[in-house]
């Protein structure tokens, strides 16, 4: 097993539990992953994974291999990393932020990065594929709610947020949808148990325009989360195997203090902030 790409495919299957999901995480086709797996099975003389109703279950040999391969790949990455890190030498920086923070902190983050490098900066709203893009290293850092994620994703806690009802409370409730956060849960009911969302939008500008006639939840941070009816922990995310990279540590040192100073903007402003 001398091919580093094959080692990465093996780890992706261990993490995903299927060749299709592993292919998605790696940005490769299922047929490619299956072909590599077949080669590994032949080379190592072990099935590595047994197919069942739930997907692929690793053999005892595969389970024993996983930590050794992870350690070996980390050592190779560290050995190939340059001894001296210079932001000015970066080719590109890619960030995905949950929208309240993208709106409130995005400009300041761009300005802080630009002071140290002229590299292109791509900063986008978090989407359903952002996590897989972190794993394929197409995204360097992301900002999202701290949730139960796989060990392949490193999460650095920043602070806890909560919310308050805002707008015309005699009108309809507008649920502001944010990917991988509140599509299937109704956190607003913790603030008003009899509230029923009848309008659903994922565009912040449109949601803001509706607030003369409707109401929603205004997101804000809290210093006493134990007393907050709604609690959302914010985190910086990156691929776990990259968390000690110079580039990642440099980005965290810039973004972390900006996020900690997050303040919700007034809904009377075009850059107002809301969630749920």
Image (cartoon, grey):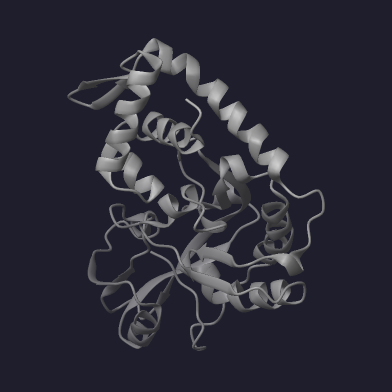
Q: Residue at x 41, y 18 (%)?
A: 62
Q: Residue at x 32, y 38 (%)?
A: 33
Q: Which of the 4 quarters of the picture holds residue 37?
A: top left
Q: Which of the 4 quarters of the picture holds residue 194?
A: bottom left
Residue 110 position, x and y percent, is 64, 75
Residue 147 position, x and y percent, is 47, 44
| Looking at the image, residue 150 lies above or below residue 116 | above
| Whether residue 137 is visible | yes
Residue 234 position, x and y percent, is 56, 54
Residue 86 shown left or right of residue 212 in the figure: right
| Looking at the image, residue 168 lies above or below residue 129 | below
Residue 50 shown left or right of residue 274 in the figure: left
Residue 239 position, x and y percent, is 55, 46
Residue 242 shown left or right of residue 117 in the figure: left
Query: Which image quarter holds the C terminus?
Result: bottom left
Q: Residue at x 73, y 73 (%)?
A: 117
The one of 19 and 197 positioned closer to us in this rendering:
19
State the count of labels.
Answer: 0
Q: Which of the 4 quarters of the picture holds residue 195?
A: bottom left
């Amino acid at each position: 097993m001398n091919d580093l790409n094959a080692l990465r495919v093996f780890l992706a299957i261990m993490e995903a539990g299927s060749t299709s999901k592993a292919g998605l995480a790696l940005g490769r086709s299922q047929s490619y992953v299956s072909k590599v797996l077949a080669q590994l099975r032949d080379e190592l003389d072990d099935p590595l994974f047994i197919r069942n109703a739930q997907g692929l279950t690793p053999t005892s040999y595969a389970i024993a291999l996983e930590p050794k391969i992870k350690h070996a790949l980390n050592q190779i990455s560290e050995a190939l990393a340059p001894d001296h890190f210079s932001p000015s030498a970066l080719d590109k920086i890619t960030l995905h932020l949950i929208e309240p923070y993208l709106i409130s902190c995005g400009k300041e983050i761009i300005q802080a990065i630009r002071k140290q490098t002229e590299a292109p900066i791509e900063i986008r709203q978090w989407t359903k594929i952002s996590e897989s893009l972190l794993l394929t290293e197409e995204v360097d850092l992301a900002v999202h709610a701290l949730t139960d994620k796989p060990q392949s994703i490193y999460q650095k806690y920043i602070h806890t947020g909560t919310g308050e009802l805002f707008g015309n409370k005699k009108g309809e409730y507008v649920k502001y949808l944010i990917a991988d956060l509140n599509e299937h849960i109704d956190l607003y009911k913790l603030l008003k148990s009899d509230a029923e969302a009848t309008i659903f939008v994922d565009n912040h500008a449109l949601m803001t325009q509706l607030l003369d006639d409707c109401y929603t939840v205004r997101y804000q941070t809290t210093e006493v989360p134990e007393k907050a009816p709604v609690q959302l922990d914010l985190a910086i995310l990156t691929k776990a195997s990259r968390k000690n990279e110079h580039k990642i540590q440099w980005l965290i040192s810039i973004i972390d203090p900006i996020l900690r100073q997050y303040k919700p903007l007034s809904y009377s402003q075009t850059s107002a902030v809301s969630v749920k």
